Image: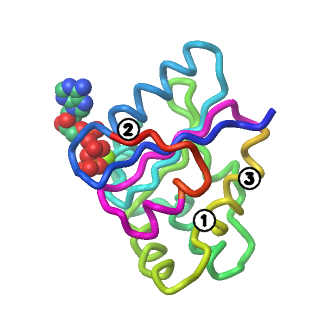
Amino acid sequence: MMGKIYVIGSQKGEVGKTTSTLNLAYALRKQGKKVLAVDFDSQANLTACYGIENTGELENTIGHLMMAAIEDEKLPAMKKCIRTEDGVDFIPSSIYLSVADAKLRLEMGAEKILSEILDPLREKYDYILIDTCPSLGMLTISPFLLGEGLPM
Ligand SMILES: Nc1ncnc2c1ncn2[C@@H]1O[C@H](COP(=O)(O)OP(=O)(O)OP(=O)(O)O)[C@@H](O)[C@H]1O
Ligand SMILES: [Mg+2]
């Protein structure tokens, strides 16, 4: 099994990216698919949708994974990063992702950083859905280089 990666992104804000990610993940889950939703937005709205409010206090987020990958350090354990809500697995985000964003602007190959995190997970999931932030910076572009875009 090689999970499909779908990226939900748009330059425009407030158009329903996060809501679409949430609903798509839930619908695919209902069809019996294994789904991983990745909150790839430092606003952490998707994470909030899964009931986590104090995201700033989280220590195992996509931002921490990205920073470890950028710094070439050992990644945090996936089982600490992946949470489950309503049967859907997800990796939370927080404001800390903006630190990775700033670093990525200075680096080449941002998509390689993300693929280091997601590639080992592709065999465990049918679908990996990535909710992105409303910009076209490196952080938002990089998942598109990995997955099949779902432009909005
Ligand atoms: N299909 C819909 N019909 C009506 N309202 C919707 C629909 N989808 C989303 N909304 C509402 O629109 C607002 C923005 O949705 P959402 O947060 O999903 O957008 P977003 O594109 O992720 O925003 P951002 O760019 O800030 O990440 C929310 O209040 C949400 O409840
Ligand atoms: Mg959003």
Q: Residue at x 21, y 45 (%)?
A: 14
Residue on which disc 3 sits = 119
Q: CA distance from mark 3 to mark 1?
A: 11 Å
> For this view, does 110 lie left or right of residue 46?
right
Please identify the quarter of the rendering in which residue 2 is found.
top right
Of circles 2 and 3, the one toward us is: 3
Vertical arrangement, residue 49 with respect to residue 92, above or below: above
Mark 1, residues whose alpha carbon is within 10 Å: few (<14), some, or many (≥20)? some
Query: Nearer the N terminus, badge 1 or badge 2?
Result: 2
Marks 3 and 2: in contact by CB < 8 Å?
no
Question: Residue 101 appears at what percent x and percent y?
Answer: 44, 73
Quarter containing the N terminus: top right
In this picture, which residue range is highlighted in magenta? 124-142
Report helix, strand or loop for mark 3.
Answer: helix
Q: Report if the beta carbon of the residue with label 3 is closer than 8 angstroms to ligand 2.
A: no
Residue on which disc 1 sits = 111
Residue type, numbered disc 2:
Gly
Q: CA distance from mark 1 to mark 2?
A: 29 Å
Question: Residue 147 appears at what percent x and percent y?
Answer: 59, 47
Residue type, numbered disc 1:
Glu
Answer whether residue 125 is magenta in the image: yes
Residue on which disc 2 sits = 51
Of circles 3 and 1, the one toward us is: 1
Q: Residue at x 72, y 58 (%)?
A: 77
Q: Looking at the image, in which quadrant does ligand 1 appear? A: top left
Question: Residue 137 appears at what percent x and percent y?
Answer: 38, 69
Residue type, numbered disc 3:
Asp
Q: Residue at x 29, y 55 (%)?
A: 11
Query: Nearer the N terminus, badge 3 or badge 1?
Result: 1
Quarter containing the C terminus: top left
